[in-house]
Amino acid sequence: MKIDALKVFKDKGEKITCLTAYDASFSKLFDECGIEVILVGDSLGNVIQGAENTLGVSMNDMIYHTQAAAVGINSALLIADMPYQSYTNAQQALMNAQLLIKAGAKMVKFEGGAAHQACFEILQANNIPVCGHLGLQPQSVLEMGGYKVQGKDKDSAQQILEDALLLESLGVLIIVLECVPSDLAKKITHALTIPTIGIGAGLSCDGQILVSYDMLGINTNQTPRFVKNFLTDSNSIKGAVNGFIDAVKGQKFPTDKHSY
Ligand code: KIV
Protein backbone atom coordinates (compact mmCIF):
# COMPACT_ATOMS: atom_id res chain seq x y z
CA MET A 1 0.00 0.00 0.00
CA LYS A 2 1.33 3.42 -0.95
CA ILE A 3 1.37 5.98 1.86
CA ASP A 4 -0.87 8.32 -0.18
CA ALA A 5 -3.55 5.64 -0.24
CA LEU A 6 -4.09 5.95 3.52
CA LYS A 7 -6.00 9.21 3.11
CA VAL A 8 -7.92 7.84 0.15
CA PHE A 9 -9.22 5.05 2.40
CA LYS A 10 -10.33 7.62 4.99
CA ASP A 11 -11.98 9.81 2.37
CA LYS A 12 -13.80 6.79 0.87
CA GLY A 13 -14.85 5.57 4.31
CA GLU A 14 -13.14 2.21 3.75
CA LYS A 15 -11.62 0.83 6.96
CA ILE A 16 -7.86 0.18 7.04
CA THR A 17 -6.72 -3.22 8.33
CA CYS A 18 -3.50 -3.50 10.34
CA LEU A 19 -1.74 -6.28 12.23
CA THR A 20 1.62 -6.55 13.93
CA ALA A 21 4.29 -8.91 12.56
CA TYR A 22 7.83 -9.53 13.66
CA ASP A 23 9.14 -11.98 11.07
CA ALA A 24 8.99 -12.84 7.38
CA SER A 25 6.64 -15.83 7.66
CA PHE A 26 3.85 -13.88 9.35
CA SER A 27 4.36 -10.69 7.33
CA LYS A 28 4.14 -12.75 4.10
CA LEU A 29 0.96 -14.49 5.21
CA PHE A 30 -0.69 -11.21 6.32
CA ASP A 31 0.42 -9.47 3.12
CA GLU A 32 -1.00 -12.29 0.98
CA CYS A 33 -4.30 -12.06 2.86
CA GLY A 34 -4.50 -8.35 1.97
CA ILE A 35 -3.70 -6.68 5.29
CA GLU A 36 -2.95 -3.08 4.33
CA VAL A 37 -0.57 -2.04 7.13
CA ILE A 38 1.90 -4.23 9.00
CA LEU A 39 3.48 -2.87 12.17
CA VAL A 40 6.70 -4.20 13.63
CA GLY A 41 5.54 -3.21 17.09
CA ASP A 42 7.71 -2.95 20.15
CA SER A 43 5.04 -5.29 21.53
CA LEU A 44 7.67 -7.81 20.44
CA GLY A 45 8.99 -7.20 23.96
CA ASN A 46 5.84 -8.88 25.28
CA VAL A 47 5.07 -11.52 22.68
CA ILE A 48 8.56 -12.50 21.45
CA GLN A 49 10.75 -11.75 24.46
CA GLY A 50 8.16 -12.59 27.13
CA ALA A 51 8.75 -9.37 29.06
CA GLU A 52 6.14 -7.62 31.22
CA ASN A 53 6.42 -4.40 29.23
CA THR A 54 8.09 -2.90 26.15
CA LEU A 55 10.77 -0.93 28.00
CA GLY A 56 13.54 -3.45 27.34
CA VAL A 57 13.18 -3.42 23.55
CA SER A 58 16.30 -2.02 21.89
CA MET A 59 17.02 -0.42 18.53
CA ASN A 60 18.93 -3.59 17.58
CA ASP A 61 15.82 -5.67 18.32
CA MET A 62 13.70 -3.34 16.18
CA ILE A 63 16.20 -3.37 13.30
CA TYR A 64 16.45 -7.18 13.36
CA HIS A 65 12.69 -7.74 13.34
CA THR A 66 12.03 -4.94 10.82
CA GLN A 67 14.53 -6.52 8.42
CA ALA A 68 12.90 -9.91 8.89
CA ALA A 69 9.32 -8.64 8.45
CA ALA A 70 10.29 -6.56 5.40
CA VAL A 71 11.43 -9.71 3.55
CA GLY A 72 7.89 -11.13 3.51
CA ILE A 73 6.10 -8.03 2.26
CA ASN A 74 4.97 -7.37 -1.26
CA SER A 75 2.31 -4.70 -0.97
CA ALA A 76 1.48 -3.87 2.67
CA LEU A 77 2.83 -0.66 4.21
CA LEU A 78 5.49 -1.54 6.77
CA ILE A 79 5.69 0.64 9.88
CA ALA A 80 8.32 0.14 12.59
CA ASP A 81 8.10 1.32 16.19
CA MET A 82 10.69 3.67 17.62
CA PRO A 83 11.52 1.85 20.88
CA TYR A 84 11.77 3.27 24.40
CA GLN A 85 14.45 5.95 24.82
CA SER A 86 15.29 5.99 21.09
CA TYR A 87 13.88 9.53 20.61
CA THR A 88 14.95 11.51 23.64
CA ASN A 89 16.12 14.36 21.36
CA ALA A 90 15.68 15.32 17.72
CA GLN A 91 19.10 14.24 16.44
CA GLN A 92 18.82 10.83 18.12
CA ALA A 93 15.30 10.43 16.71
CA LEU A 94 16.51 11.20 13.20
CA MET A 95 19.45 8.81 13.41
CA ASN A 96 17.32 5.95 14.76
CA ALA A 97 14.45 6.57 12.33
CA GLN A 98 16.95 6.43 9.46
CA LEU A 99 18.18 3.04 10.74
CA LEU A 100 14.62 1.65 10.72
CA ILE A 101 13.99 2.99 7.23
CA LYS A 102 17.26 1.38 6.10
CA ALA A 103 16.04 -1.88 7.67
CA GLY A 104 12.96 -1.80 5.41
CA ALA A 105 10.31 0.28 7.20
CA LYS A 106 8.40 2.80 5.11
CA MET A 107 7.24 4.77 8.16
CA VAL A 108 8.21 4.99 11.85
CA LYS A 109 5.88 5.22 14.85
CA PHE A 110 6.38 7.40 17.92
CA GLU A 111 4.41 7.31 21.18
CA GLY A 112 3.38 10.70 22.55
CA GLY A 113 2.43 14.19 21.49
CA ALA A 114 3.69 17.73 22.08
CA ALA A 115 6.67 16.56 24.14
CA HIS A 116 8.23 15.20 20.93
CA GLN A 117 7.51 18.17 18.68
CA ALA A 118 11.21 18.66 17.79
CA CYS A 119 11.44 14.97 16.75
CA PHE A 120 8.40 15.26 14.46
CA GLU A 121 9.82 18.45 12.93
CA ILE A 122 13.22 16.98 12.14
CA LEU A 123 11.68 13.86 10.60
CA GLN A 124 9.35 15.98 8.48
CA ALA A 125 12.32 18.10 7.35
CA ASN A 126 14.12 14.89 6.34
CA ASN A 127 11.13 13.35 4.53
CA ILE A 128 10.72 10.42 6.91
CA PRO A 129 7.03 9.44 7.16
CA VAL A 130 5.73 9.31 10.72
CA CYS A 131 2.87 7.53 12.49
CA GLY A 132 1.76 8.90 15.87
CA HIS A 133 0.48 6.93 18.86
CA LEU A 134 -1.76 8.61 21.46
CA GLY A 135 -3.96 7.50 24.34
CA LEU A 136 -2.43 4.60 26.24
CA GLN A 137 1.30 4.67 25.53
CA PRO A 138 2.86 1.39 26.68
CA GLN A 139 6.33 2.99 26.84
CA SER A 140 4.95 5.30 29.56
CA VAL A 141 3.38 2.48 31.58
CA LEU A 142 5.32 3.47 34.69
CA GLU A 143 4.25 7.15 34.53
CA MET A 144 0.68 6.17 33.62
CA GLY A 145 0.53 3.79 36.59
CA GLY A 146 -0.42 0.72 34.53
CA TYR A 147 -2.31 -0.13 31.37
CA LYS A 148 -5.34 2.10 31.86
CA VAL A 149 -7.89 3.69 29.57
CA GLN A 150 -6.82 7.28 28.82
CA GLY A 151 -8.90 10.40 28.17
CA LYS A 152 -11.76 9.51 30.50
CA ASP A 153 -12.09 13.00 32.00
CA LYS A 154 -12.66 16.28 30.17
CA ASP A 155 -9.13 17.68 30.54
CA SER A 156 -7.25 14.55 29.52
CA ALA A 157 -9.64 14.02 26.59
CA GLN A 158 -9.00 17.60 25.45
CA GLN A 159 -5.23 17.04 25.76
CA ILE A 160 -5.37 13.95 23.52
CA LEU A 161 -7.48 15.83 20.95
CA GLU A 162 -5.01 18.75 20.99
CA ASP A 163 -2.04 16.39 20.62
CA ALA A 164 -3.73 14.71 17.65
CA LEU A 165 -4.31 18.06 15.95
CA LEU A 166 -0.73 19.09 16.68
CA LEU A 167 0.64 15.86 15.18
CA GLU A 168 -1.40 16.39 12.05
CA SER A 169 -0.08 19.97 11.75
CA LEU A 170 3.48 18.62 12.12
CA GLY A 171 3.08 16.33 9.12
CA VAL A 172 2.26 13.05 10.89
CA LEU A 173 0.39 10.85 8.39
CA ILE A 174 -1.58 8.44 10.56
CA ILE A 175 -2.31 8.14 14.30
CA VAL A 176 -2.82 5.02 16.42
CA LEU A 177 -5.32 5.65 19.22
CA GLU A 178 -4.94 3.08 21.99
CA CYS A 179 -7.44 2.52 24.81
CA VAL A 180 -9.47 5.70 24.69
CA PRO A 181 -13.26 5.96 25.05
CA SER A 182 -15.07 5.37 21.75
CA ASP A 183 -16.70 8.83 21.87
CA LEU A 184 -13.33 10.54 22.13
CA ALA A 185 -11.85 8.44 19.29
CA LYS A 186 -14.86 9.38 17.15
CA LYS A 187 -14.38 13.09 17.90
CA ILE A 188 -10.65 12.91 17.08
CA THR A 189 -11.28 10.90 13.90
CA HIS A 190 -13.75 13.51 12.69
CA ALA A 191 -11.45 16.41 13.62
CA LEU A 192 -8.51 15.04 11.59
CA THR A 193 -7.99 14.74 7.85
CA ILE A 194 -5.40 11.95 8.42
CA PRO A 195 -6.58 8.45 9.38
CA THR A 196 -6.82 7.12 12.93
CA ILE A 197 -6.13 3.46 13.66
CA GLY A 198 -7.80 2.17 16.79
CA ILE A 199 -6.90 -0.48 19.32
CA GLY A 200 -9.44 -0.41 22.12
CA ALA A 201 -10.77 2.86 20.66
CA GLY A 202 -14.10 1.82 19.17
CA LEU A 203 -15.62 1.39 15.75
CA SER A 204 -15.36 4.98 14.50
CA CYS A 205 -11.61 4.95 13.88
CA ASP A 206 -10.55 4.84 10.24
CA GLY A 207 -8.85 1.49 10.76
CA GLN A 208 -8.14 -1.18 13.36
CA ILE A 209 -4.97 -2.83 14.59
CA LEU A 210 -4.39 -5.83 16.84
CA VAL A 211 -1.25 -7.54 18.05
CA SER A 212 -1.23 -10.63 15.83
CA TYR A 213 -0.41 -13.01 18.69
CA ASP A 214 -3.48 -11.70 20.55
CA MET A 215 -5.83 -12.17 17.59
CA LEU A 216 -4.53 -15.72 17.20
CA GLY A 217 -5.11 -16.45 20.90
CA ILE A 218 -1.42 -17.17 21.53
CA ASN A 219 -1.05 -14.65 24.30
CA THR A 220 -3.58 -15.85 26.82
CA ASN A 221 -2.18 -14.64 30.18
CA GLN A 222 -3.91 -11.32 30.37
CA THR A 223 -6.25 -10.69 27.50
CA PRO A 224 -7.27 -7.03 27.34
CA ARG A 225 -10.94 -6.25 26.73
CA PHE A 226 -10.22 -4.95 23.19
CA VAL A 227 -8.76 -8.27 21.96
CA LYS A 228 -10.74 -10.78 19.95
CA ASN A 229 -9.37 -14.23 19.19
CA PHE A 230 -10.22 -14.71 15.50
CA LEU A 231 -8.77 -18.23 15.41
CA THR A 232 -11.64 -19.69 17.43
CA ASP A 233 -14.05 -19.19 14.49
CA SER A 234 -11.60 -20.55 11.94
CA ASN A 235 -9.48 -23.64 11.42
CA SER A 236 -6.40 -21.88 10.01
CA ILE A 237 -4.28 -18.80 10.59
CA LYS A 238 -5.19 -17.54 7.11
CA GLY A 239 -8.86 -18.01 7.98
CA ALA A 240 -8.40 -16.02 11.19
CA VAL A 241 -6.69 -13.16 9.33
CA ASN A 242 -9.42 -13.15 6.68
CA GLY A 243 -12.00 -13.14 9.49
CA PHE A 244 -10.28 -10.09 11.00
CA ILE A 245 -10.21 -8.33 7.62
CA ASP A 246 -13.90 -9.09 6.95
CA ALA A 247 -14.92 -7.96 10.45
CA VAL A 248 -12.98 -4.68 10.21
CA LYS A 249 -14.09 -3.90 6.63
CA GLY A 250 -17.68 -4.83 7.48
CA GLN A 251 -17.54 -2.71 10.66
CA LYS A 252 -18.38 -5.71 12.82
CA PHE A 253 -15.20 -5.36 14.89
CA PRO A 254 -14.71 -3.90 17.41
CA THR A 255 -18.11 -4.29 19.08
CA ASP A 256 -19.10 -2.47 22.28
CA LYS A 257 -17.76 -5.49 24.15
CA HIS A 258 -14.26 -4.65 22.83
CA SER A 259 -14.54 -0.89 23.43
CA TYR A 260 -14.61 1.58 26.31
O1 KIV B 1 3.72 -2.26 19.74
C1 KIV B 1 2.61 -2.47 19.23
O2 KIV B 1 2.28 -3.59 18.83
C2 KIV B 1 1.69 -1.36 19.09
C3 KIV B 1 0.27 -1.67 18.75
C4 KIV B 1 -0.40 -2.24 19.93
C5 KIV B 1 -0.46 -0.50 18.24
O3 KIV B 1 2.08 -0.24 19.28
Image (tube, rainbow, N blue to C red):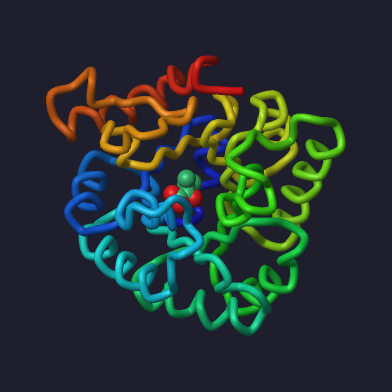
| Residue 247 lies in quadrant | top left
Percent position of residue 183, x then y:
70, 24
The answer to whether 230 is drawn above or below residue 144 in the figure is above
Q: Among all residues in the image, which is located at the extreme left?
A: 235
Q: Is residue 83 left or right of residue 115?
A: left
Q: Nearer the viewer, residue 204 or 222?
A: 222
Q: Residue at x 73, y 30 (%)?
A: 187
Percent position of residue 241, x then y:
26, 33
The answer to whether 55 is drawn above or below residue 124 in the figure is above
The answer to whether 65 is drawn above or below residue 160 in the figure is below
Q: Tell me if residue 77 can be seen.
A: no
Percent position of residue 144, x then y:
68, 47
The answer to whether 92 is drawn above or below residue 200 in the figure is below
Q: Residue at x 57, y 26 (%)?
A: 202
Percent position of residue 188, x then y:
71, 36
Q: Residue at x 58, y 40 (%)?
A: 147
Q: Nearer the viewer, residue 9 or 218?
A: 218
Locate the C terminus by quadrant.
top right
